[in-house]
Amino acid sequence: MLTVDHLSKRLPGGKLLLRDINFSVGEGEFVAILGLSGTGKTILLRCINRLTTPDGGEIVLTDNGTPLNITQSNASEIKEVRRRIGMIFQSFNLVKRRSVIENVLIGKLGRISMVRSLMRRFEDDDIEMAHRALNRVGISDLADRRAGTLSGGEQQRVAIARSIVQDPCLLLADEPVANLDPTTAEVVMEHLRSISVDNGISALAVLHQPELARKYATRVLGVRDGVIVYDGDAGLSDDDFETIYGSNDA
Amino acid sequence: MLKNRYAVPVLFLLFFIWSVIRTGFSIRDLIAGVPNLSNFIGCMFPPAWDTFVPLISPAIETIQMAFLGTVFAVALSMPVALLAANNITPSKPVKVFARSIIAFTRTVPDIVFALIFVSAVGLGPVPGILALAIHSVGMLGKLYAEAIEEVDPGPVEAVEAVGAGKLQAVHYAVIPQVTPSFVASTLYRFDINVRSSIVLGLVGAGGIGFELIMAMRLFRYHEMLTILIIIFIVVMLSEWASNSIRAHVIGEEVLK
Ligand SMILES: Nc1ncnc2c1ncn2[C@@H]1O[C@H](COP(=O)(O)OP(=O)(O)OP(=O)(O)O)[C@@H](O)[C@H]1O
Ligand SMILES: [Mg+2]
């Protein structure tokens, strides 16, 4: 459903960060991306929803049999692509001075009319859907709180609820649990897995702990020196670990 | 090295001396003027209390000039600031254009705008309101744009990442972040505009300032003192009002 073909991305300074990235993500898969800090995992995710423009290669997203060429999209097609791709950030990226429920409703902004959205009036159905999404992630009692007053784990669950409301076919997550304690991290990962399974959403998550990848992912991609050096089972052998993280001269 | 160390103080001193000579600033004249000054102040006492009540109406007009001038300035400054802010502007030429508007309106003093508008639309508060509205864009546009540039880009990206447009991203992720600083800048500008609208009255733009210059021209010194007392009250009241609103907004920040 997502195919990345010969993707390349150069840094502003001219350095070729992503050289030749090739992989695909199938229906319902939960794929973890592992790799050393600075290898370009974040930039890879941002190329997929076009928060960044890649320099070469092709990314195609197929939703309900309709292929969308992400790399060839113009501005309005990019919006169409983004509507189908949810994104979870390491720093949650909620609007702190707004209520939790309004943050969840932001997930709907790609699908409602400009006038309605500028009046901040949402349909009753959408509001109910937002409450159900909060209920799904176990924080329905926080709907009216200011988002900035929530704990990190609660904020990430609001972000997940925002993605549930958005109803994408692919979910990108960039170190979704890096700012959370181990127990809360498990809770959040569990929610990510459950919406992936229950809603049939494929997921592509950058993780920094191979144990989390082993537990939650169905597959692992290892990124190194601008290419995919590992594509396979989530249970990494010592050799696989070395391939992804080991020092080059070892 | 050594030369540089002395260059600034020496230039400062030379310019100071030249300025004193050229403007004819002399302490002796100043001291000689003290009896005149005290004589003048003496003439103003006691204030003409019978003019107090009739002067309340122009005092309210002054506040209303400042209020409307500030409201229109906010309406003008917001779009200009969005176009001028590095992180929101649609393109470089647009940004340069918006920044030129800000620079121009800030550089031209409000009194110059007022003189132009008085000759265009005649005496009264309207030219004063226009002058305040336009000159304030120079400060508010700049402060707003700076606040917009300091916004956390994360939430803005999160809104854009769901497929929303730029305008929606501004509305949902930028505006909430800049609201406290917008409120503070606007109240600060309102305080300045209350004082400015008094000065603009002196060039014919209505309000209590216009009454002051008329009283002065007609040598009604007792009435002048009443006007000065009213000006003092007006300034105190408006500062108290904006301080209460500020405290209310900031208080809300802390509590919620
Ligand atoms: N806007 C930019 N301008 C210049 N260099 C950038 C920019 N954005 C990212 N980089 C560089 O690109 C490289 C890869 O960044 P990226 O954030 O994708 O790494 P990452 O694999 O996600 O690392 P981490 O695991 O630490 O999050 C880094 O060296 C970073 O400094
Ligand atoms: Mg990263």
Image: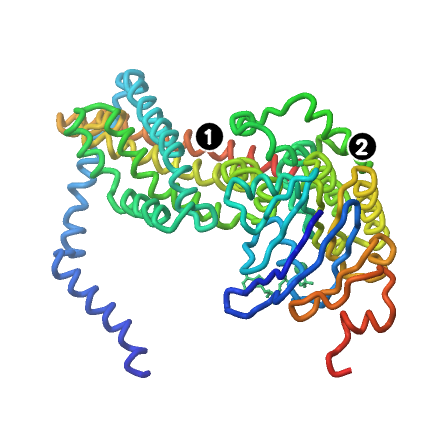
The correct choice, above or below, for A182 with respect to A145 in the image is below
Q: Secondary structure at mark 2?
A: helix
Whether labels 1 and 2 belong to a single chain: the reply is: no
**Label 2 is placed on what type of residue?**
Asn
Mark carried by residue A135: 2
Tag 2 subunit: A
**Residue found at x 51% / y 69%:** A14
Q: Within the displayed image, which quadrant is ligand 2 positioned in?
A: bottom right
What is the number of callouts on the image? 2
Q: Secondary structure at mark 1?
A: helix
Q: Quadrant of residue B118?
A: top left
Q: Is residue B5 left or right of residue A245?
A: left
Provide residue B181's location: percent of width, then percent of height: 50, 42
**Residue found at x 45% / y 48%:** B146
Label 1 crowd (10 A; few <14 / some 14-19 / many >=20): some
Residue topped by disc 1: B241
Which is more toward the observer, B62 or A71? A71
Q: Answer yes or no: disc 1 within 8 Å of ligand 1.
A: no
Provide residue A20's location: percent of width, then percent of height: 63, 65
Q: How is the image coloured?
A: rainbow
Q: Is residue A236 left or right of residue A105?
A: right
Q: Is residue B28 left or right of residue B140?
A: left
